[in-house]
Image (cartoon, rainbow, N blue to C red):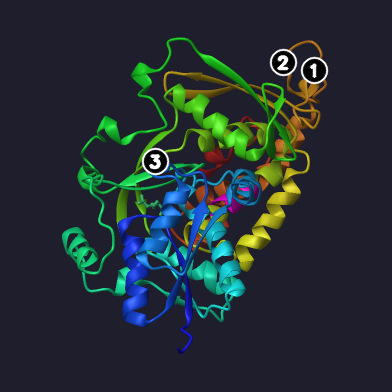
Amino acid sequence: MEKKDIVVLAYSGGLDTSCCIKWLQEELNLDVVAVVGEVGQEHDEDLDEIRAKALRAGAIDCYVVDMREDYADNFLTKAIFANALYENKYPLLSALSRPVICKYLVEVAHRYNAKYVAHGCTGKGNDQVRFENSIAMLDPSLTILAPVRDWEFNTRPQEMEWAAAHGVEVPTTQGSPYSVDDNMFGRAIECGVLEDPWTEPPSDIYKITVDPQEAPDKPTYVEIGFSAGVPVKLDGEELSMVQMVEKMNVIAGGNGYGRLDMVENRLVGLKSREIYECPGALVLIEAHKALEDLCLEREVLHNKLELEQKWATQVYYGMWYSPLKEAIDAFMASTQLCVTGTVRVKFYKGSCTVVGRKSIYSLYNEALATYGQDDSFNHQAASGFIELNGLSARNWSANRRWAGAHTDIDDAFANPQPLSLKPSVLEDSTIETLG
Ligand code: ARG
């Protein structure tokens, strides 16, 4: 028998990717190797069952790969370094998980000498871009297939019908009306009634955050210890990054913190309404920012703020493995060397507030900042500083006032431009001399 080409498929266990297995086999005559990425998502079924399901659907093999540690240590830490929030809000939980999954898809493809890699994304979302860009940057010789974009059935009932006709298991329970993507960094929920941005999200969509109204009536305090930008201690206890994210989800989510209701700009050009619950991600970023405020020199901090936006947009756009994103990572890493210290955070009924921060690398100098007795700041130096700092703008202001006070150029030169650019209001009588 002629040996078939192999395709490595990112498999979730859901109806879409189960149909992908059958479709790749029947329509393209490929042998399918399924890869399930464990990134800390919720499972309706256990992983053994998902694996068995892939094999029943016709996969020749199925790998369940535990990517959690890699994801947390090498992807989420970088997101925290960059305080990454797309459009200043969304901590990129879906966007961050795609490149780690792609890393393993490509690895398995190499092991099997596969020509193809496939994903189950639709043609409307960001995730197809992330899969395809990441795979292509990791190995440009692989050909990428996107069955969901190519097959002829578009609606859920049509898909169920096709599945039943081709021997793919159809879910027996009435599926959720929402489309959910989740991993340890949070949950993304869209579709159904959420498609109307005027509709308040129904309470049953939330799984890892309590309603703030139902959160404890007493505040909860935690102390997060960072070492070179990485959150490593919770209330003095050393934790791995996976444990840190998981614990923060429980504590913050239990206090009703971490819900986002957002209309965002997708890369493919449309706006979409998405609900997120990502308590751990948001707390860690908030706390990390607070420590940076203490430890980063002003110009580094200001420039970092701009690069943070760039980083988040690159990652949202599926550019995890791009040279720009990696170059920004190098900048971020260099800024993190002294982001070491402790941040105290208070949760209360849906809010999360940083209420304390300390570090041996703190650049906050009490002797300079105080208005009390121990003030060592040189007040006299301020006036010279202001004079030169504002010189350019004052020069502009004086010129425009002078120019504006004359009707023509001869008149203007008959009344020369005042030379005095002294900062003092009394001495700088520009306005009067203009008369
Ligand atoms: N809008 C988010 C993003 O593009 C999440 C997409 C995940 N999908 C979902 N079914 N909610 O990163």
In front of the other: 155 or 92: 155
Graded by Cα atoms within 10 Å as few (under 14), some (14 to 19) or many (20 or more), the crowding at tag 1 reads: few
Graded by Cα atoms within 10 Å as few (under 14), some (14 to 19) or many (20 or more), the crowding at tag 2 reads: few
Query: Which residues make up the magenta segment?
Result: 303-309
Q: Is residue 12 above or below residue 193?
A: below
Q: Nearer the viewer, mark 3 or mark 2?
A: 3
| 367 drawn magenta | no
Residue 319 visible in the snapshot:
yes
Q: Amino acid at mark 2?
A: Tyr
Would you say the residues marked 3 and 2 are in contact, meaning their CB atoms lie under 8 Å apart? no
Q: Amino acid at mark 1?
A: Asp
Q: Position of residue 166 (x, y in %)?
A: 24, 69
Would you say the residues marked 1 and 2 are in contact, meaning their CB atoms lie under 8 Å apart? yes
Q: Is residue 2 left or right of residue 415?
A: left
Mark 3 and mark 1: span between their CA atoms? 46 Å
Q: Secondary structure at mark 3?
A: strand
The residue wearing badge 2 is 371
| The CB of the residue at mark 3 lies under 8 Å from ligand 1 | yes
Question: Which of the two discs, 3 and 2, labels the residue nearer the N terminus?
Answer: 3
The residue wearing badge 1 is 375
Q: Position of residue 422 (x, y in %)?
A: 69, 39
The residue wearing badge 3 is 276
Q: Residue at x 24, y 47 (%)?
A: 175
Magenta region, main secondary structure: helix
